[in-house]
Amino acid sequence: MARAALLLLTLLWAVTRTSTQTQSSCSVPSAELPWVNGIQVIMEDSVINSTFPNPSILIAMNLAGAYNLEAQKLLTFDLMASDTADLTAGQLALTIMALTSSCRDPGDKISTLRTQMENWTPSSLDSYASTFYGPSLAILALCQNNPETTLPIAARFAKILLANSSPFDVDTGAVATLALTCMYNRIPIGSEEGYRALFTQLLKKIVEDISTRIRDNGIIGDIYSTGLAMQALSVTPERPNKEWDCQQTVDTVLDEVKEGKFQNPMSIAQILPSLKGKTYLDVPQVSCSPDQEVKPTQSDFPSPVPTSASNITVIYTISNQLRGVELLFNVTISVSVKKGSVLLVVLEEAQRRNPKFKFETTMTSWGLQVSSINNIAGNVNDKTYWQFLSGKTPLIEGVADYVPFNQEHITANFTQY
């Protein structure tokens, strides 16, 4: 009897501690909601013409409350019918969460993911931090399905993360925080207290790391990593030493929305849940009753101010200086494009004028990615890829989203990570 009472007190302590330490709430002012609705419509409308069924978009739709029910239904069915044999742990986890948020049974996908994580090991203890992004999503998806069977897998994963010496990037740290918070909140009654201590220790380390990336304007890491970071900081039971002004972050993100920074469907999927007051921890609680809300039309929300049609000049350099790669080069060209054109138009114009600038793209969940330039292609095994920079600053938007300015020097540099 005494033991049962002690366990109940422990559970109540954990719940109280989680609720009292949750970051103060922040929200989108009602006058700014049309901007948020606007990017949601852009994201949902992308589903109809997309050949890539993106589970992150379906999760965001379900958490926010979908407007386009046709797109929601189409994406759900596409993911149910998709072949998951070659998916990574992270991709499979997102698919499971997407189906769960749609009140669909993921079936044997869960057991497949559990087996993957039971056998998962990093390549080394000093693995690049992003190596843990997919496995963190996997722990989150498994936790939401069955925390009891996930507990030993999560504990093993947490010990590996503690032993890793590489600093976390914001996205990986945020997803790891969500996964560990899910486990922390759902430790089965009667489990050893050592589990709670382990998750607490790691959460404190990761959250502290994320807090060091909070900028003076509230952005966390960069504008596109901020959405996941907001989710993490809003639910973690471990508060960072550095205070986070959630409302300032929301206000700055809204300013970026108004400037047209969120046009890529994947970038919208990352930020939308936070702007709607939701996190990935809410996936199991999504209501699947039909939403009678009327879809906004184009006139219901504002759009970024259109740019003029005058031309600009962009200096574009392609460079491969990696030793061991067959073809070394450093070639520069100046191209003229209409003001407001995305970087992809610059690449196409350069290719038209000089065959050395020939490039190829592949479609990813984030949109088009340049996979090859001048017949040199990135390689996962060699950890090589084409990195785009403005001056010396890496671009955080893709070629189909970034809008160059007049006389900007863009460099595509073949590099290793």
Image: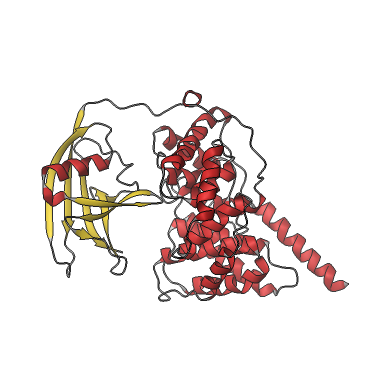
The structure's colour scheme is secondary structure
Please tell me which residue is depicted at 48% across the width and 62% down the height of the picture: 84
Quick check: can you spot residue 291?
yes
Looking at this rendering, what residue extends furthest in the right direction?
1
Q: Where does residue 40 sit, x and y in percent of width and height?
A: 50, 37
Please tell me which residue is depicted at 55% across the width and 27% down the height of the picture: 31
Q: Quadrant of the N terminus?
A: bottom right
Snapshot quadrant of residue 4: bottom right
Please tell me which residue is depicted at 41% across the width and 68% down the height of the picture: 166
How many dots with numbers?
0
Q: Quadrant of the C terminus?
A: bottom left
Q: Is residue 235 above or below residue 402?
A: below
Q: Where does residue 251 sit, x and y in percent of width and height?
A: 50, 37
Q: Where does residue 176 sit, x and y in percent of width and height?
A: 52, 62
Quick check: can you spot residue 245?
no
Snapshot quadrant of residue 385: bottom left
Q: Compare residues 68 and 159 and report the one nearer the observer.
A: 68
Please tell me which residue is depicted at 17% across the width and 45% down the height of the picture: 316
- Taking the image as shown, residue 369 lies to the left or right of residue 151, namely left
Q: Where does residue 88 sit, x and y in percent of width and height?
A: 45, 64
- Taking the image as shown, residue 69 lies to the left or right of residue 379, namely right
Looking at this rendering, what residue extends furthest in the top direction?
299
